[in-house]
Amino acid sequence: MNTLTAQKSAQSSVIAVKKTWKSSLAVYIQLAVCFIVFVFPIVWMLMSAFKENVDITSYPPKFIFSPTLDHFRELFVSYPFGKYIVNSLIVTGGSTALGLLLGVPAAYGAARYGLQWTAFLTLIARMAPGILFLIPWYVIASQLKITDTYMTLIVTHTVITMPLIVWLMLSYFQEIPKEIEESALIDGCGPFRVLWQINIPLALPGISVSTALSFIFSWNYFLFSLVLSGSNTTPLTVAAFNFIGVAAVDWGGLMAAATVITVPVLIIVALVQRWLIRGLTSGAVK
């Protein structure tokens, strides 16, 4: 009897070891796929930004090389990349602020008064292809002679930021108990004070997540800026496109410009990662 029990115990141990080994292998495969798809392109971009041009296109690829800052130096000496960075910050910051100013009250109203269908309309606007809005906006801006202005780019980028903010904040406001508002109203608070002093502080994690995601989406958006910007308002994404020519591509300059565009986004994600994950799991997904 004891021998039979020992054999069963040994078989169970072998099965457990096999399951653990298979689970570990599956995790490693998933990590490898994630690294190849998401991380390796960023690593390749960073490596190429510090390579000589001859090393960027060499075959087989060089993973050990002498780093150089020539491409970054060229960005700021031969091109006004400092101005492009300022332009991107103005447009992205302005569209994020305008999106919050319009989107947070809209999400609160939709959550409290059962107007989710209006939020759905904003989602349709976000999911529609950008070219759908670009043509009428270009015609209007051209007629009003307001192309190549910060305000035009900020307003157009709000189409990206505001629907995102509305849909993220909608679930946050729905999670706040109505009894808290009712108590405040009984104590004499008006609707504006209820929103400003009670709901917004309680929804700050959602606002932080909305701000970070809106900034990232607007920072990386290319289409509206390509058509509606000019020499005075060129953002980074359009400036980087200039390194792609008809006959040749300046890979060193392009990778350096892409690095300048990507680094702020990576820094923001790293800084708000904890709140980003918590916000997306506790508010937006519910």
Image (cartoon, grey):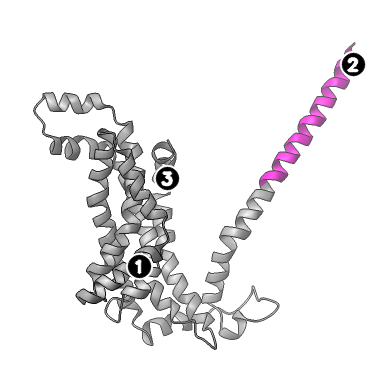
Q: Label 2: which residue?
A: 4
List x then y, in percent, for residue 75: 41, 82
Give residue 92's quadrant in the image.
bottom left
Q: Amino acid at mark 3?
A: Arg
Give the distance between the C-alpha atoms of the residues marked 1 and 2, in whole angstroms.
76 Å
List x then y, in percent, for residue 151: 22, 68
Q: Label 3: which residue?
A: 274
List x then y, in percent, for residue 89: 30, 67
112 or 272: which is nearer to us? 112
Residue sitting at the far top: 1
Crowd class of label 2 (few under 14; some 14 to 19; many from 20; radius 10 Å) = few
Q: Mark 1–mark 2 contact, CB under 8 Å?
A: no
* 174 in magenta: no
Q: Is residue 188 above or below residue 118?
A: above
Instruction: Report the side of 116 relative to 197 (left or right).
Output: right
Crowd class of label 1 (few under 14; some 14 to 19; many from 20; radius 10 Å) = some
Q: Amino acid at mark 1?
A: Leu
List x then y, in percent, for residue 265: 41, 61
138 or 161: which is nearer to us? 138
Q: How many marks?
A: 3
Q: Amino acid at mark 2?
A: Leu
Residue at 44% from the left image edge and 44% from the top image edge: 277
Q: Label 1: which residue?
A: 134
The magenta span reads 1-27
Crowd class of label 3 (few under 14; some 14 to 19; many from 20; radius 10 Å) = few
Give residue 81's quadrant in the image.
bottom left
Q: Is residue 44 above or below residue 200?
A: below
Residue at 65% from the left image edge and 49% from the top image edge: 30
Residue at 31% from the left image edge and 53% from the top image edge: 162
Give the distance between the C-alpha atoms of the residues marked 2 and 3, in whole angstroms.
51 Å
Helix, strand or loop under label 3: helix
